[in-house]
Image (cartoon, grey):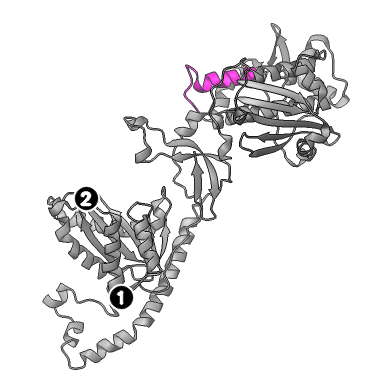
Amino acid sequence: MADFVLEYSRRPDQHHESGEQEWWTLRVDGASRSSGSGVGLLLQSPTGEHLEQAIRLGFSASNNEAEYEAILSGLDLALALSVSKLRIYSDSQLVVRHVQKEYEAKDSRMARYLAKVRSTLQQFTEWTIEKIKRADNGRADALAENSTCNFIEANQADDQEWTHDIAEYLRTGTLPEDPKRAHKIRVQAARFTLIGGHLYKRSFTGPYLRCLGHSEAQYVLAELHEGVCGNHTGGRSLAHRAHSQGYYWPTMKKDAAAYVQKCDKCQRYAPIPHIPSIALKSVSSPWPFAQWGMDIVGPLPAAPAQKKFLLVATDYFSKWVEAEAYASIKDKDVTKFVWKNIVCRYGIPQIIIADNGPQFDSIAFRNFCSELNIRNSYSTPRYPQSNGQAEATNKTLVNALKKRLERAKGKWVEELPGVLWAYRTTPGRPTGNTPFALTYGMDAVIPTEIGLPTIRTDAAKQKDADTELGRNLDWADEVRESASIRMADYQQRASAHYNRKVRPRNFKNGTLVLRKVFENTAEVGAGKFQANWEGPYIVSKANENGAYHLQS
């Protein structure tokens, strides 16, 4: 639906010729059957895209009423898409001639429908309506016939419909011809009364409640929600407030909730949910150094040579970390880092996972990886947590540097080798082993074992020490297999714990959505008054892993 959102200025009651590329086409049809009534809509953009809707009406309607409902629904859809120039085609001669002012609407219901249509058409810059043959309106006719499959309730154009029969019965004693409806009106009327020509409902908790039609109810909701005394409350609170002020209509709670959901400000300033919307998907590596995650940390406090950034690479299997400090990081620096610190030391990896930064997603780096048959995998631009291994490593390294530096923040480059050594020789919970042991087949000798020798360091002085080291290397594969099994079990338990909090939220292609505001998209100077969401955007492609491609 990316091409359906077109912004045009609206100047009512102006009709002049314009380019064909700006005109939209709307084909409508209504159907009334014993099983129910429905409408079909076919809206075509200037570039040829089609939007179809089949709507089942929530009330019994005649053929002419269904035709009018079809036009009203189509006009509402066009206005929602900011259409300004519209050509309307219908196979109902009566409705078309009414709108063209060639026929007079003598029936009171038709007159109210006609007034509603003309009022809505004034919101378009230019419009035309034409009568076409039924055979030329086949698609809209088919949608109307099939509309019983869709239970989207439409409002009647007659705003006073629900109050009309009750008021007439109280005023003149007149009842509808339908026996069932007449009985319903007679029973309902006991709870209503006329005061000063207005219909009121007897309340169980307070004074009489004034009954409102659709347009009056929308006015009350607008004033209470966003007027001078409004504070953009939620749907339930809005309905309660309208009731407390002395108003009533049958669908108060539903209309209040729908009004709040459509409020632009309520959506843009809505709280950011922290409950996950998709199950956790763990990423694992089959063997050491087959899969690396890369990320950039910084800017950090300036160190000698103006080094402010840290380029970090983490092996997904052994959790081994390689890192270097830079004053600035470009794609050529990433290429040299991968060649020197990964390829020349541990062999050519299968996959390198990184974010969408220009240092990683560049033609030069892609060509370098392609020549070595390395597959590039990128996390989504707005969700770096999808490269979770790199993010977790970054957090650990930064925390370790903080505790070592104290006030001398610029010495982080000098402390980096010690932090990396500590990280490599510390057992991790997922694997149960140190990255050093999974890499080299045995644990490293640390300074404490030099100051206070252990059995392991004493054994290294014996004549058969080389034989024992050889056995450790022979057992390295078994140790790695055990670590792989332990890591898989850890990931399953982590997923089970995470997935208990998941509340699925899915968006289909063409859905209008808002996107969380990030630092680079925040309004300048907004501060604490910054909106939480921006947009709207259109979902152009929905992936199975919970990622979406958006178009503005």
Picture quarter with the N terminus: top right
Mark 1 crowd level (few <14, some 14–19, many ≥20, 10 Å Cα): some
The count of marks equals 2
Say if residue 503 shows up in the picture: yes
Q: Where's residue 333, x and y in %? A: 26, 58
Q: Is residue 363 magenta?
A: no
Say if residue 155 shows up in the picture: no
> Quadrant of the rendered structure where residue 394 is?
bottom left
Q: Are marks 1 and 2 in contact (CB under 8 Å)?
A: no
- Give the mark, 1 or 2, whose residue is nearer the N terminus: 2
Residue on which disc 1 sits? 439
Task: Return the mark for residue 397.
Answer: none
Q: In this view, does 88 lie to the left or right of 453?
A: right
User: Predominant secondary structure in magenta?
Assistant: helix
Q: Which residue occupies 52% across, 30% down?
A: 234
In what element is the residue under mark 2?
Answer: loop
Task: Return the mark for residue 300.
Answer: 2
What are the residue bounds of the magenta stretch?
A: 214-233
Q: How far apart are marks 1 and 2 (CA)?
A: 29 Å
Q: Where's residue 446, x and y in %? A: 18, 74
Q: Where's residue 126, x and y in %? A: 63, 21
In what element is the residue under mark 1?
Answer: helix
Q: In this view, does 465 lie to the left or right of 92?
A: left
Q: In this view, does 126 lie above or below 318?
A: above
Q: Which residue occupies 57% across, 28% down?
A: 82
